Amino acid sequence: MKNSKYKIVVLSDLKKSAITTLKSSVSLAHMIDADIELFHVKKHVDIIKRDNQLSAMRSINEEFISTKNKIKALIDPVSKAYDIPINSNFSFGNIKDEIRTYIKDTKPDIIVLGQRDSKPLKFIGDSITHFLLKEFNGVVMISSNEHALVPNEKMTLGVLNGSDKTFKTELSKDLITHTQSPLKSFKVINSQNTKTESPSNYNEDTLEFVFEKNDNTIPTLSSYLLKNNINLLCVDRDENSKMKNKNASVLPLKETVNKLNVSLLVSGAL
């Protein structure tokens, strides 16, 4: 039996964007040689509507069968179309507690989840995304609902403010081989605090875009990402949250996740 290099877990709510998130995960799995498992959690309160114990047990049994069928209907066509096995698992209970336990038991290398369809200001908050970035130390991919990765197609990879940590990993070397050249680097600076630097030097073909930090930075950066057909933008979790990079004007991770409509690959924590 073939041993894959990585394990990807796809956290799914089984809603309309689930198919897009799953395909992005398949694309990533093909590039880095990874196994995929989809995991879904449903709250008990959404299943049990009555206090009667017999009715509650019946509701749980019905929901178990329904959820199993929904997951099968989601993953089977994708698995067949792209010739990749996709495992699945699900549970009922407190969403965060179930995810925490699942991560501890399965020890994935990468967790993938989709963007929420809610308003930007509510996207992170106390959401699953925010919880996951605090709870899980590995790599997190947040798949864009509109500009997702496409299986069996080369992607256009971008890096934000250097993203040095991401590119020191074995994972980055696997990604680079599936990336259209040139690699594109996007840097946000405060010109008053930034000394003149040479361009980022991940490879000889790196193309760098530099933006001045102001009120229009995020819309301008987002526009450039789309114009350059960036499929996946690498972001360093610690540099964005702790502002370690003194020369770059670091964008808060919350703002980056909320407002950039491309798929993001957030590096693991230290």
Image: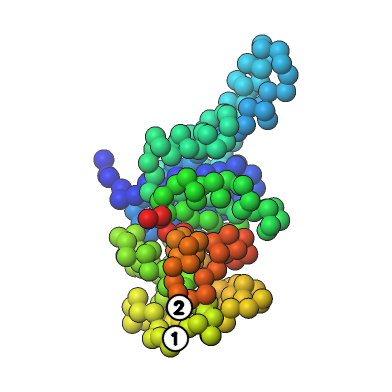
Position above or below: 203 against 31: below
The circle on residue 153 is none
The circle on residue 195 is 1
Looking at the image, which residue is at 60% across and 20% down?
61
Looking at the image, which residue is at 71% across and 13% down?
52
Contact (Cβ within 8 Å) of mark 2 with mark 1: yes
Name the residue that disc number 2 marks: 247
Work out which residue is located at the far right of the displayed protein and give it: 50
Q: Residues within 10 Å of mark 2 (few under 14, many from 20)?
A: some
Q: Position of residue 251 (x, y in %)?
A: 55, 68
Looking at the image, which residue is at 38% across and 59% down?
31
Snapshot quadrant of residue 32: bottom left
**Element under disc 2:** loop
**Element under disc 1:** loop
Tell me the kind of residue under disc 2. Answer: Asn
Looking at the image, which residue is at 39% across and 79% down?
200
Snapshot quadrant of residue 212: bottom right
Looking at the image, what colour scheme do you see? rainbow
Quarter of the picture containing the C terminus is bottom left
Q: Position of residue 49 (x, y in %)?
A: 72, 23
Would you say 160 lies left or right of 18 here?
left
- Residue 116 in sight from this viewpoint: no
Would you say 257 lies left or right of 4 here?
right
